[in-house]
Image: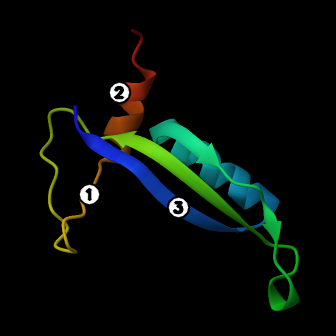
Amino acid sequence: MTGVNGLEVWLTGTRAELDAATAALTAAGHLVQRGTRHALTGADAGRYRLYLRLNVAAAAGRPVRDSGTGGGSLIDLDAARAIRRRPA
């Protein structure tokens, strides 16, 4: 099974938004690294930024299409979640 290894994501939002996004991304793959939340200032006060690195498996049984943006791939996240939730 192929996938995306070392996918790097910067998230920006409230604590609740970061928690929800982290949970959704972790459900789709394996969390490799989670950075420290950094509080934003000025007009973004009350919001935070967070760095995540994940490994995400590509959907089994479905072809991965090239997005046309220099070799990137689209992943069916629902299928990836289903694969992760299957009992071993």
Discs 3/1, front: 3
Q: Position of residue 64 (x, y in %)?
A: 16, 50
Q: Residue at x 26, y 57 (%)?
A: 74
Indicate the position of residue 58 as horizontal and vertical percent values.
27, 41
Image position, residue 22 (x, y; %): 63, 49
The answer to whether 40 appears left or right of 22 in the picture is right
| Residue 5 sits in quarter | top left
The answer to which quarter of the image holds residue 84 is top left
SS of the residue at dot 3? strand
Q: Residue furthest bottom?
A: 43
> Looking at the rendering, in which quadrant would you find the C terminus?
top left
Give the residue number, with chain letter if any, for mark 2: 83
Indicate which disc, 2 or 3, sits on the residue closer to the N terminus.
3
Mark pair 3, 1: CA separation: 15 Å
Residue 9 circle label:
3
**Looking at the picture, how far across and down is residue 45, in whole percent?**
87, 80
User: Which residue is drawn at the image coordinates 87% and 74% (left, top)?
Assistant: 46
Q: Label 1, secondary structure: give it.
A: loop
Residue drawn at x 77%, y 56% is: 16
Residue flagged by tag 2: what amino acid is it?
A: Ile
Disc 1 residue type (three-letter):
Leu
Quick one: label 1, few (<14), some, or many (20+) residues within 10 Å? some
Q: What's the distance in space between the residues labelled 2 and 1, CA to CA?
A: 16 Å
Residue 8's mark? none
| Whether residue 87 is situated above or below residue 11 in the rendered picture | above
Q: Coloured how?
A: rainbow
Disc on the earlier residue, 3 or 1? 3
- Between disc 2 and disc 1, whose residue precedes? 1
